[in-house]
Image: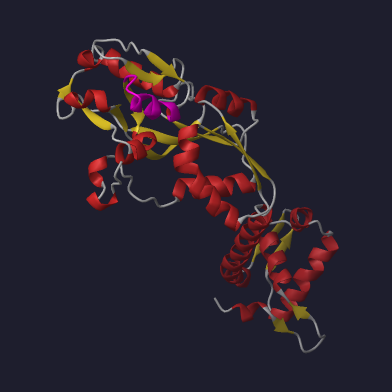
């Protein structure tokens, strides 16, 4: 659109016909009332009337027909409105986008995250976000999923990044943004199991290492065992996925762990990956938000980045690495 149309000079009285005149015309046409337009624009009715009269004088035509019920557009007014509407709406959108950008430049964002999502998902995006919005303060809470959901319900965090299965999130907005693979690992004493396809009942014959009861990962494995007619009986329970691979490395049992936590041990320290006779479902990394608590502009900007970011394909097994990338141990 040629915006020069909106900036004409009246040579007779030196009046500048600026965008304000067309904005006021637009508001009166939309409200079909000078008084309602005045209220919306926080101007007096005489001021609105004067603007309209000056615009009509400049354009040499009547734009409105006045009546006791309000105002209606003339044919000339309807033609002008079609052109002005697009420009006003574009300007309003531009102003809104600018204000949102300004609001994103400061503030604080409270995020709940598990050890898995913090280490292997969130950190790269937080780095990118900080580069764009260096004055926004980030407060990250290392919460389990149940604690994160309670914090969401209380409104003490803006959103949480959790792993499936997520129980008790029926009233929240859950967006799956990535996924990962769990595996079964063993140390040097169990190399005789490598290359075999094992059942869950066979695994139960050996010492097992897994997360403690109540954790999301433990619930995941408990459900797999239950779905296949047996029960998980671990010999060692830990409260962090970080502890499973070192425990398995010392031959204290066969472990159940997300691949990302075992990758360096598989590549560098001689742990082996065991095969089951059943597929292990991939699990999701999800952003959970409480729709009852609106986000600040800064939190919304980070959430949009996390949801819409393009991601590289995940490497989830040792076979996907080129041989030259495997380190000796």
As displayed, is residue 214 above or below residue 80?
A: above
Residue 265: quarter of image: top left
User: Looking at the figure, which quarter contains the C terminus?
Assistant: top left
Q: Where is residue 16 in the image (x, y as percent from the top left)?
A: 77, 80
Residue 174 appears in the figure: no
As displayed, is residue 130 above or below residue 226?
A: below
Q: Which residue lies furthest to the bottom in this view?
A: 11
Say left or right for 294 vs 272. right
Q: Which residue lies furthest to the front in this view?
A: 329
Q: Position of residue 195 (x, y in %)?
A: 15, 30
Q: How many labels does the image show?
A: 0
- Closer to the camera in the image, 265 or 42: 265
User: Looking at the figure, which quarter contains the N terminus?
Assistant: bottom right
Residue 209 appears in the figure: yes
Indicate how the structure is coloured in the image: secondary structure
Q: Tell me, yes or no, whether the highlighted magenta stretch contains residue 312.
A: no
Give the residues in magenta. 242-253
Residue, x 81% and y 69% (percent of image)?
Answer: 50
- Closer to the camera in the image, 129 or 234: 234
Report the predominant secondary structure element of the magenta stretch: helix
Residue 131: quarter of image: bottom right
Say left or right for 54 vs 254. right
Q: Where is residue 38 in the image (x, y as percent from the top left)?
A: 78, 57
- Closer to the camera in the image, 77 or 178: 178
Q: Tell me, yes or no, whether the highlighted magenta stretch contains residue 252.
A: yes
Q: Where is residue 177 in the image (x, y as percent from the top left)?
A: 42, 41
Residue, x 61% and y 58% (percent of image)?
Answer: 97
Residue, x 80% and y 81% (percent of image)?
Answer: 15
Residue 182: quarter of image: top left
Say left or right for 129 vs 41. left
């Amino acid at each position: 659109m040629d915006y020069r149309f909106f900036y004409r000079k009246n040579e007779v009285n030196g009046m500048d016909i600026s965008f304000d005149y067309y904005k006021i015309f637009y508001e009166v046409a939309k409200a079909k009332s000078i008084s309602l337009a005045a209220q919306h624009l926080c101007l007096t009715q005489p001021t609105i009337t004067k603007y309209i009269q000056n615009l009509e004088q400049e354009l040499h035509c009547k734009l409105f027909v006045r009546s006791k019920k309000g105002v209606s557009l003339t044919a000339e007014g309807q033609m002008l409105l079609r052109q002005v509407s697009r420009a006003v709406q574009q300007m309003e959108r531009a102003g809104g986008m600018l204000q949102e950008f300004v609001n994103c430049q400061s503030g604080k964002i409270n995020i709940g995250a598990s050890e898995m999502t913090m280490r292997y998902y969130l950190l790269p995006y937080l780095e990118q976000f900080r580069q764009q919005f260096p004055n926004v303060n980030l407060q990250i809470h290392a919460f389990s999923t149940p604690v994160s959901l309670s914090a969401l319900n209380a409104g003490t965090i803006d959103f949480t990044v959790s792993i499936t299965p997520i129980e008790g999130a029926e009233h929240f907005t859950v967006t799956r943004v990535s996924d990962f693979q769990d595996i079964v690992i063993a140390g040097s004493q169990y190399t005789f199991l490598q290359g075999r396809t094992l059942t869950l009942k066979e695994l139960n014959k050996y010492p097992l290492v897994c997360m403690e009861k109540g954790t999301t990962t433990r619930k995941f494995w408990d459900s797999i065992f239950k779905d296949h007619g047996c029960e998980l009986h671990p010999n060692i329970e830990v409260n962090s996925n970080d502890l499973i691979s070192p425990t398995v490395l010392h031959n204290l049992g066969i472990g159940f762990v997300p691949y990302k936590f075992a990758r360096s041990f598989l590549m560098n320290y001689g742990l082996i990956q065991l095969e089951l006779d059943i597929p292990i479902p991939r699990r999701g990394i999800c952003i959970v938000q409480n729709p009852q608590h609106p986000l600040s502009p800064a939190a919304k900007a980070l959430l949009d980045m996390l949801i819409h970011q393009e991601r590289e394909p995940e490497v989830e097994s040792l076979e996907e690495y080129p041989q030259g990338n495997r380190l000796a141990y």
